[in-house]
Every structure is written in structure tokens, then in C-alpha cells.
Amino acid sequence: MKTYTLLLLAGLLTPLAQAATEKFGEAVDLTKLIPVTELMASPSDYLQQQVTIEGTVVSVCTKRGCWMEIAAQESSERLRVKVRDGDMVFPISARGKHAYATGMLTEIVLSPEQSRSYLENQAKKNQQVFDASAVIEAVTLYQLQPIGVEIRETH
């Protein structure tokens, strides 16, 4: 009787354990895991290389689910994970969950005009004062173009 109860219980819990991880694209490669803080400390060292990052999903595109931002656990450092619209659709419910993403780190160099616009939008978003005359250098953004993503309830 005890054996049947355990088997029944295991059978009931298995779908719950599987539902706790959402997978998108190819399998995540944990052998290429690099902390977001290390990656962002010297991003040029990792450009056009396949890497895997992990962290907490702090933001998700509310229109198409085409991007999400993953933050390192120990800092406020964030990295955007971006796909072409429709390639993968990240659910808004991913916010606050743990994620792994494998892909290529890319660099986007903004013109001075684009940099001012970007920084102005960031200031508005963060309710900060913006001084356009203080922007004298172009901004470089980094993002991960994933081939595989896993979003987990816990890690």
C-alpha cells in the first residue's frame, strides 16, 4: 500500500516539477556560464562569442515579449536579452523568476544624437533630471541575442 501511495504521489508531482521551467529555442549551455557582472566588466572580451548568463528577470517587453532584462543577483547590473519579434516570446509572468540564456553578445554603438535620446528616456523612466549638454560621448549598449533560454520558478 505504501509503494502505491508513493508512486501515485510521484506521478502527481512530476508534471508540477516540469511546469516549473519554461524553455525557449535550443538547450541552454551551462558549460559557458559567465556572471553578468563579469561579462559587463569587460564586454568587449566576449563580443561575438557564445556565452550563457543567469540572473533574475527584472523586466519583459509588454508588447511582443521580444526582450527581457536579466539582473545579476549581487548587483544592479542588467543585460538585455533580445530576439527578433516572434522568434521567442517571453511571458510577462517571467518577471521575478530565475533565467539562463545562451547566445551571442552584441554591441550597439549609438550616435551622439541617439545617445542623448536614449539617456533622456532613461532619465524620464527613472524620474531623474536630464541635461542634454552633459552628453558628450556616444553610448554603447550591449545585449545578448539568445539561441536558448530557460526561465525557472527557482534555481
Image (spheres, rainbow, N blue to C red):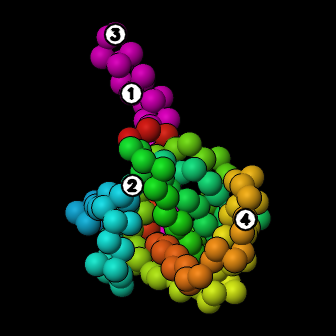
Q: Earlier in the sequence, mark 4 or mark 3?
A: 3
Spatial CA span between label 1 and label 3: 14 Å
As for residue 5 lying within the magenta part, the answer is: yes
Closer to the camera, 113 or 7? 113
Magenta residue span: 1-26
Q: Callout 1: few (<14), some (14-19), or many (20+) C-alpha neighbours within 10 Å?
A: few
Name the amino acid type tagged 2.
Glu
Residue at numbered disc 1: 10
Circle nearer the viewer, 4 or 1: 4
Q: Are marks 4 and 1 in contact (CB under 8 Å)?
A: no
* Extreme-front residue of the structure: 133
Circle nearer the viewer, 4 or 2: 4
Q: Are marks 4 and 3 in contact (CB under 8 Å)?
A: no
Residue at numbered disc 3: 1
Name the amino acid type tagged 4.
Phe
Looking at the image, residue 6 lies above or below residue 18: above
> What x and y, as percent, mark residue 4?
36, 18
- The residue that appears at 52% across and 76% down in the rendered structure is 141
As for residue 121 lying within the magenta part, the answer is: no
Name the amino acid type tagged 1.
Ala
- The residue that appears at 49% across and 63% down in the rendered structure is 79
Spatial CA span between label 4 and label 2: 32 Å
* Extreme-top residue of the structure: 1
Residue at numbered disc 2: 54
Name the amino acid type tagged 3.
Met
> What x and y, as percent, mark residue 142?
48, 75
Residue at numbered disc 4: 130
Majority secondary structure of magenta residues: helix
Q: Earlier in the sequence, mark 4 or mark 2?
A: 2
